[in-house]
Amino acid sequence: MKFTKFILSFAVAGAIMGGVATTASADTYNNTNATYNQQASTNYYNPNAGTPKATVNSNDSRADAVVSLAKQLATQNIPYVWGGESLQGMDCSGLTDYVYQKAAGISLGHYTVTQESHVTKEAVSEAQPGDLLFWGDEGATHHVAIYIGNNQFVAAPQPGQNVDVETISSAFMPSFAGHVNG
């Protein structure tokens, strides 16, 4: 209880002084059976403090948090696992849903077509960092990733590969992009 009061006091002090309010919520893992337990999906990732962020002040800070978390996950050797949505393994839509839940408190659902319903469609050339990139026809997409800027994206590519940073190329060009609503 004292720890909770300390965190609350810290959050209030940070808000008053213009800092970033944080909470003590974190992900926990049970290594014996590789299950993943998420405590709260309403906290936001703070790329500067490394802890969940209590509030997001603008779309820019939300996009920054999304990009920062996506890049971080690309360095953690997370394997592609079909249907996965945890640090134990992810598929493409599991990655995008995980990042948006943690970084922005937005649940996109775990299916590319479902995620299409959460975006405002745009041309790939108009994509901004934090936007989603989709491959396939609208309503029948088969792959999704997070655009991070400079013609790059973070994806859970395919079985046998890990979540990584990739470059947009004509050999595997996204069909369209989407700015996440909410």
Image (cartoon, rainbow, N blue to C red):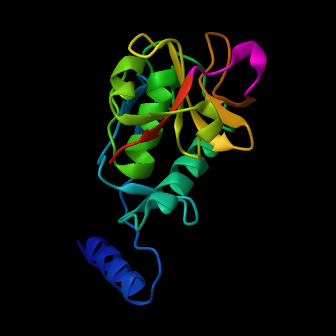
Q: Position of residue 91 (x, y in %)?
A: 51, 19
The N terminus appears in which quarter of the rendering?
bottom left
- Answer left or right for 96 relative to 8: right
Inspect this view and state whether residue 172 appears.
yes
Q: Is residue 19 magenta?
A: no
Residue under the image location 33 percent in, 40 percent down: 38
- Answer left or right for 69 relative to 112: right
Q: Position of residue 103 (x, y in %)?
A: 45, 50
- Position of 176 relative to 58 (above/below): above
Task: Looking at the picture, tell me which residue is in the foreground, 151 or 12.
Answer: 151
Write the start and end of the magenta stretch as one range.
168-175
Majority secondary structure of the magenta segment?
Answer: loop
- Answer left or right for 28 relative to 50: left
Question: How many discs appear?
Answer: 0
- Position of 83 relative to 176 (above/below): above
Residue under the image location 61 percent in, 10 percent down: 159
Residue under the image location 34 percent in, 44 percent down: 106
Q: Position of residue 84 (x, y in %)?
A: 45, 20
Residue under the image location 76 percent in, 18 percent down: 170
Inspect this view and state whether residue 86 appears.
no
Q: Position of residue 121 (x, y in %)?
A: 45, 32
- Position of 154 relative to 102 (above/below): above
> Residue most toward the bottom?
17
